[in-house]
Amino acid sequence: MIFDSSSKKLLLIAGPCSLESRELSLEVASEVARLSKKFSEEIIVVFKGSFDKANRTSIKSPRGTGIKLGLQILSDVKSEFSLPVTTDVHEPHQCLPVAEVCDVLQIPAFLCRQTDLLVAAAKTGKTVNVKKGQFLSPYDMKHVVSKLREANAQEIWQSERGTTFGYGNLVVDMRSIAIMAENNTPVIMDATHSVQFPGANNGVSGGDRTFVPLLAKAAIAAGANGLFIETHPNPERALSDAATQLPLECLEELVVSCLKIKRALI
């Protein structure tokens, strides 16, 4: 087990949206590892990075490194910084090779009801973090969790990442954290994807990163066990989610703020 919610620690999943390159990934991982050591008594850290952004708005948008190079980069991060790592899987056949490297398999929000994918991820024996679809009620996540449990998943996390609100916008209902917690798994707040404006920026998703700290802190106050934060040294130049990634230099400040809230709740 990677994360025991009864420990009262904060689970932090952090890294770039797309792995982009080995150099970028190691730069971000170095800062994430530093925070892991600095706050080791209070946080559990998992490094994240995607090898394929398979659901880009436009076919012309960069997809990422691909699975072979992406898994090599994640392996390098894991060995160099002694961090558990995670990436998303999009098809059942990806689960086994990804599980050879990654400690956590992430199910993208758009795919959270895909039974074959959920079962394949669960059968690897690795932790599965499944994101609630933007189209899904938090009450319906019990069925997603049930699929994973029926497939003997060893450890399950659920992530909130906003709900479709009209066209090109998302809204976060903080009640969903308590509702999803009734499924007896840790609940994570994806504070960066939740500030997206999906497909609303001329063929790419826009967003407003200024609301990331607000949502992160509100979620911790509402009882979330962890945070999912995409972070980049220069978000404006990121190959994906440029409008929503948190500047890497701001990550520590956000962690400190959220830990203050968590301490007040203990």
Image (tube, rainbow, N blue to C red):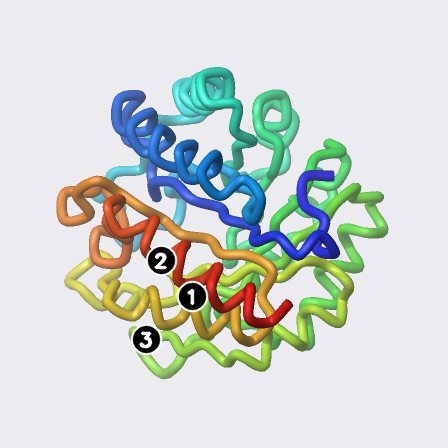
Q: Earlier in the sequence, mark 2 or mark 3?
A: 3
Q: CA distance from mark 3 to mark 1?
A: 18 Å
- The image's mark for residue 216 is 1
Location of mark 2 (residue): 254
Q: Earlier in the sequence, mark 3 or mark 1?
A: 3
Q: Nearer the viewer, residue 67 or 177?
A: 177
Q: Where does the image place residue 138, in percent across and percent down from the top left?
A: 62, 74
Q: Amino acid at mark 1?
A: Ala
Q: CA distance from mark 2 to mark 3?
A: 24 Å
Q: Is residue 13 above or below residue 186?
A: above
Q: Residue at x 21, y 58 (%)?
A: 243
Q: Amino acid at mark 3?
A: Asn
Q: Where does the image place residue 228, in percent across and percent down from the top left?
A: 46, 53
Quarter of the rendering containing residue 28? top left
Disc 1 residue crowd, few under 14, some 14–19, many 20+, Cα 10 Å: many
Disc 2 residue crowd, few under 14, some 14–19, many 20+, Cα 10 Å: some
Q: Secondary structure at mark 3?
A: loop
Q: Are marks 3 and 1 in contact (CB under 8 Å)?
A: no
Q: Is residue 251 above or below residue 216?
A: above
Of the residues tagged 2 and 1, which is closer to the observer? 2
Q: Is residue 173 above or below residue 81?
A: below
Location of mark 3 (residue): 169
